[in-house]
Amino acid sequence: MAIDIDRLRRTPAYPFVEAAHYLNLPVSTLRAWCLGQRYRHNDEVRVFENVIQLDGEPRDGLSFLNVVEAHVLMAFRRKHRIPLPKIRQALEYTSQQLEIERPLADNRLQTDGLDLLVERLGALINVSKDGQLEMASVVEAYLSRIERDPKGVPIKLYPFTRNDDTSDAPAPVEMNPLVSFGRPVLVGRAVPTAVLADRFKAGDSLVALSEDYDTTSEAIEEAIRCELDRRRAA
């Protein structure tokens, strides 16, 4: 029986707590991105709408594509703290101009779409050309962690395993909806990072684990980092 890969990518599989952990985000932040949020401004209750459209019901969590979208959205928020309403406006503009359904996951964001989006954001928040170039560079580092099929649809995500989110940060861990139900695994070995972390906590050394799985101690260490609370360790 053939696997419907497109359906698998869009099937909710990650509870908010779990997705936030792998993305190194506060759960409340991820929920706000996906569900919107009420907030108070000068004694007035306001609402900003969600930026990410979930592929299922909120209780079911995020799909793989939703996780990819959140990963890309982090690039705009973590470095530049761009207000979500401005990001949403820029994404809607980019979506209309390029006629794409979900720009944060679309491969055209890696080409002409990125310039269009960054230029629009620059106009909305009054960022200089140099600032726009810096913003684009940060986003490109996040986009480089996404592997796509020949049609440009995301098939793998290489999440950051540490707070270093530059383009040359290690990428020994992958999330693939076809492997281990989309949970993080060691690249090339398909060993869940949770298994490695459990063995390490039980007393196995990095060297012993690297010998067992025929890889480097550095790769094992980064894979274990994926299971740590990096916000607490930072």
Image (cartoon, helix red, strand yellow):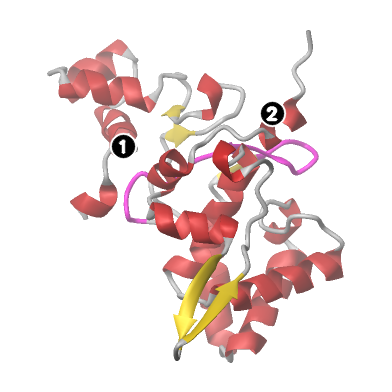
Tell me where the magenta segment starts and ends, as one range. Answer: 148-164
Q: Quadrant of residue 7?
A: top right
Q: Which of 129/226 is in front?
A: 226
Q: Which of 31/197 is in front?
A: 31
> Residue 134's x, y, as percent?
51, 76
Label 1: which residue?
A: 222
Q: Tell me how far mark 2 sits from mark 1, CA to CA.
A: 27 Å
Vertical comparison of 105 with 9: above or below: below
> Residue 100's x, y, as percent?
82, 58
Does residue 61 appear in the picture of this structure? no
Q: Nearer the viewer, mark 2 or mark 1?
A: 2
**Residue furthest left in the image:** 203
Residue drawn at x 43%, y 47% is: 20
Task: Name the kind of residue labelled 1 in the image.
Answer: Glu
Residue 198 lies within the magenta run: no
Vertical comparison of 13 with 71: above or below: above
Tell me if mark 2 has few (under 14), some (14-19) or many (20+) residues whose alpha carbon lies within 10 angstroms of its own: some
Residue drawn at x 64%, y 86% is: 124
Q: Quadrant of the C terminus?
A: bottom left
Q: Quadrant of the N terminus?
A: top right
Label 2: which residue?
A: 8
| Lower position in the chain sequence, tag 2 or tag 1 | 2
Circle number at residue 124 = none
